[in-house]
Amino acid sequence: MSKSKKLDFRPNDYVVYPAHGVGQIISVEEQEVAGYALELFVISFEKDKMTLRVPTNKATDIGMRSLSSPDVINQAMKTLKGKAKVKRAMWSRRAQEYEQKINSGDLIAIAEVVRDLHRTDDQREQSYSERQLYEAALERLTREVAAVSGGDEILAAKQVGDVLASRVAPAAA
């Protein structure tokens, strides 16, 4: 596959942009930049009230991708059910790793962050930065689950919440 391979994205498609999560392509336009004609995907991130223009020939290089398949969503849900894996490294180092996973655009990596930072009411308090990373990962995961299943974020949030709750529920005696 050549580096500048054009992806088959079309207006109205939902895509995942690694650093921003789920967005919708609203158009493909041509702009002149420094004397060169450049074809750009115009992507809207409605929730963040942001529009991004991405050169069509760079979309693959930066990791822009289609929404995950239902199989990947199921895999992410399985990941959430797993036992949290918290390294004994310093928080700044772990925070950096979590940030990289969130911005990778990889749904399974994002699910790992949610799993590892999830707290139940009876667990110790989270620091502000832990909470920020957890919420960012949770939002990315929820938005993609919603987009894949038809767009209902409230339903997707409940689905993710139920999986996290089932993970900590004690086994019935």
Image (cartoon, grey):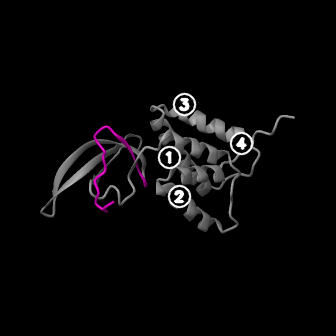
Q: How far apart are marks 1 and 4 (CA)?
A: 20 Å
Residue to which mark 1 is pinned: 140
What crowding class fits label 3: few (fewer than 14 Cα within 10 Å), some (14-19), or many (20 or more)? Answer: some
Instruction: Tell me the SS state at disc 1.
Output: helix
Determine whether the residue tagged by mark 3 lies in a helix, strand or loop.
Answer: helix
Amino acid type of disc 3? Leu
Residue 50 vertical placement versus 103 (above, below): above
Mark 2 or mark 4: which comes first in sequence? 2
- Report the front residue among 13 and 130: 13
Q: Which of marks 3 and 2 is nearer the N terminus?
A: 2
Magenta segment: does it hold 161? no
Alpha carbon distance from label 2 to label 4? 22 Å
Depth check: give the residue in front, 57 or 1.
1
104 relative position to 168: left or right: left
**Residue 167 — which label?**
4
Q: Neighbour class for label 2 at 10 Å: few (<14), some, many (≥20)?
A: many
Instruction: Characterize the magenta stretch by its predominant secondary structure.
Output: loop
Q: How many labels does the image show?
A: 4
* Circle 4 residues within 10 Å: few <14, some 14–19, many ≥20: some
Tag 2's secondary structure?
Answer: helix
User: Where, by quadrant of the figure, is residue 95 drawn?
Assistant: bottom right
Question: What's the magenta region?
Answer: 1-19
Describe the element under mark 4 as helix, strand or loop.
Answer: helix
- State the residue position of label 2: 101
**Relative to 16, is 63 above or below?**
below
Q: Distance between the residues labelled 3 and 1?
A: 14 Å
